[in-house]
Amino acid sequence: MRFLDKLKKCISKNNSLLCIGLDPNLNKLPHIFPREKKSILEFNCSIIETTYDVVCAYKLNSAFYEALGARGFEILKKTIENIPDEIPVILDAKRGDITSSVEMYAQSVFVEFGADAVTFNPYFGVETIEPFIQFDDKFVFVVVLSSNQGAFDFQYLRCGDKFLFQIIAEKFLGEKFANVGFVVGATRGEDISLVRNLSDEKLFLIPGIGVQKGDLEIALRYGINRDKICLINVGREIIYASDSGDFKQKVRLKAIEFRDKINKIVERL
Amino acid sequence: MRFLDKLKKCISKNNSLLCIGLDPNLNKLPHIFPREKKSILEFNCSIIETTYDVVCAYKLNSAFYEALGARGFEILKKTIENIPDEIPVILDAKRGDITSSVEMYAQSVFVEFGADAVTFNPYFGVETIEPFIQFDDKFVFVVVLSSNQGAFDFQYLRCGDKFLFQIIAEKFLGEKFANVGFVVGATRGEDISLVRNLSDEKLFLIPGIGVQKGDLEIALRYGINRDKICLINVGREIIYASDSGDFKQKVRLKAIEFRDKINKIVERL
C-alpha cells in the first residue's frame, strides 16, 4: 500500500494526527529499565504497546540509534519490526548526498530497515531526492524549516524576494513529487503559512511541539492540508512521561492528551 | 593527537595528499571476492593493506555501509579498526540536525565508531556543529560546494551579492572553528577559489576527482592552503582498479599514480 493511503487509514482508524518520536536516550530511560543498550528495545516496545492505537505514525530519529554504535542499528531494525504493519514508520535520518550515495541510503532506509518514509536534507540539490522517490510506495519529507534557532542562519536567508526555505520548497511541488512532503518546525509559528501557501496539498511533518514549545494551534492552522491532515510529532514529552512503575499508563495518558488536544483544535479550524 | 597534527604527520611520512574513498559496493566487488556482505570487510582490508603507505587519510562514506543494513555498521567499525592508528579516518556521513540530535551523531561517529573526522551538512545552522567541535582532537568538514550537478540548485543561489555557499562558508571562519574545514567538489573548478579567498588557512577535502572528472590541477591550485595541503579524495577509480587476481597490485599502482600526479602539480604551484 502507498504511504499516503496507509497513513490516512491509520489516521482515521485511530482518529489521530499524533506521531510519536521514538528517540530513546540511554541516560533518560525510566529507572525501571536497567541502564544498558538492550533496554532500549524493551523501552521502545513498551511505548509501542501502550500507544499503537493512539497514533497515526511513529518517527524514529536515526541519531539516537547511531549513538549506540553498530548495536543501535539492530535495535532500530527490531523496533521497526515491532511496530504493527498498519502503522507508518518514518525514519528521521535527514540524509542528503550526491545521487550515487543517496541510492545507498534509499537501499538502507527502505529495504534494509523497512521504513515507510524518510526525512531528506535538500542541500545537495533537487535531483538527489530521485533514489528515494523511485520507491513509489514510500514517502520522503524534505526538511524545509527546522525547529531550532539555527533555522535563522541559512534557511531564512533572503534570495531575491524570497527566503531560501521557500525557494527550496517550491522545487519539490508538482506531480513528480507527489510522494514528497515537508518538515516544518512548529516553533516557526506563522511562518509555516509561507510554506503552506505554496501548496494546499502537501503533507507536513511537524516537530517542535512539547519540550521545544512550538505553538500547537498555529502549527495546525497552517500545518494541515486540504484533507485536514498533517503529522504532529511529539517525542520527549510523551516517552519520558514517567520515571517509575506507572510508566506505561502515563505514556498512554500523555499520548491520549496530545491526540485529543490536536483533534479539538482541528475541529475548530 | 589533534587531527591536523595527525594528518600533517601522515602527509609528510607518506609524501601524499591522496585520500582513498573506501566506498564499497557489493555489486562492483572484484570477482575474486564472493558476492556476500562479509566480503566487504575483506575487500576493504585488502585495499588498506596495499595502500596504507601511499595515502594521507581514508574516507568512508557511511551510505555504502548503511546500504548493508545493521551488519554494515559492524563492517564499518571493523574497517576503521583495521586502519593503522597513525592514518586519519574521515567518516563521510554528511550529518546535520538540531543540536540535541547532533550530540547523538557526535557520540556515534567519534566515540562508537572512532573516526577522526566527520562531514557535516550545514542546513540546520551554525550552532548545530557545536557537538562535533566540542571534541577538540577531532575535525569537521562542512559541506560547502558539492561535486554533483545538483550543487547549482541551491548552493549557487544568489543571496544579496554572494552565493549561498559563500555565506555558509563565511560563518565557519575564525578561531572558534579552527578544527573545521570545508568539502569543496573538484568539479566546481575555478569556483573553488571563491571559497579559498575567504581563508588561506582552511583545510579542504576535495571529492570529485576520478570517475566524476573534476580537474585535478585547478582543484589543487585553489584547494591547497598556505601549508600547501588539502585532501584529494579518490574512490571508485582506485578501489575498482582491477576485477581479477592482480587486484591488490593494480590498486596500489593506481594509488601511487594519483599520489605522484598530485605531488607533481603541487611542486609547480
Image (spheres, coloured by chain):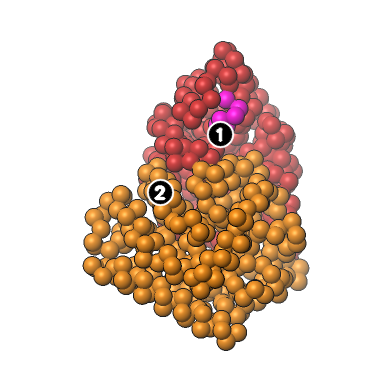
Chain colours: A red, B orange
Q: Regarding mark 1 in the picture, which secondary structure is present there? A: loop
Q: Residue at x 36, y 66 (%)?
A: B50
Q: In the rendered image of this protein, does residue B172 appear above or below residue A250? A: below
Q: How many marks?
A: 2
- Dot 1 crowding, Cα within 10 Å, few <14, some 14–19, many 20+: many
The chain letter under disc 1 is: A
Identified by mark 2, the residue type is Lys
Determine which of the numbered discs, if any, sits on residue A216 in the image.
Answer: none
Task: Say left or right for B17 vs B136.
Answer: left
The verdict on residue A118 being magenta is: no
Q: Chain of mark 2?
A: B
Asked if the residue at tag 2 contacts the one at tag 1, i.e. Cβ–Cβ closer than 8 Å, the answer is no
Amino acid type at circle 1 is: Asp
Instruction: Looking at the picture, tell me which residue is in the foreground, B8 or A215.
Output: B8
Q: Which residue is mark 2?
A: B78
Identified at 48% across, 25% down, the residue is A39
Q: Quadrant of the C terminus of chain A?
A: top right
Q: In this view of the protein, can residue A227 be seen by the observer?
A: no
Residue at image x 62%, y 30%?
A236
Q: Is residue B2 left or right of residue A8?
A: right
Compared with A139, B92 (above or below) is below
Quickly name the residue at label 1. Answer: A23
Residue B193 in view, yes or no: yes
Residue B91 higher or lower than A192, as above or below: below
Q: Are marks 1 and 2 on the same chain?
A: no
Magenta region, residue range: A24-29
Measured as percent of width and height from the top left, residue B153 is found at: 59, 65
Place of residue B80 in the rendered image (x, y in percent of width and height, measured from the top left): 45, 52
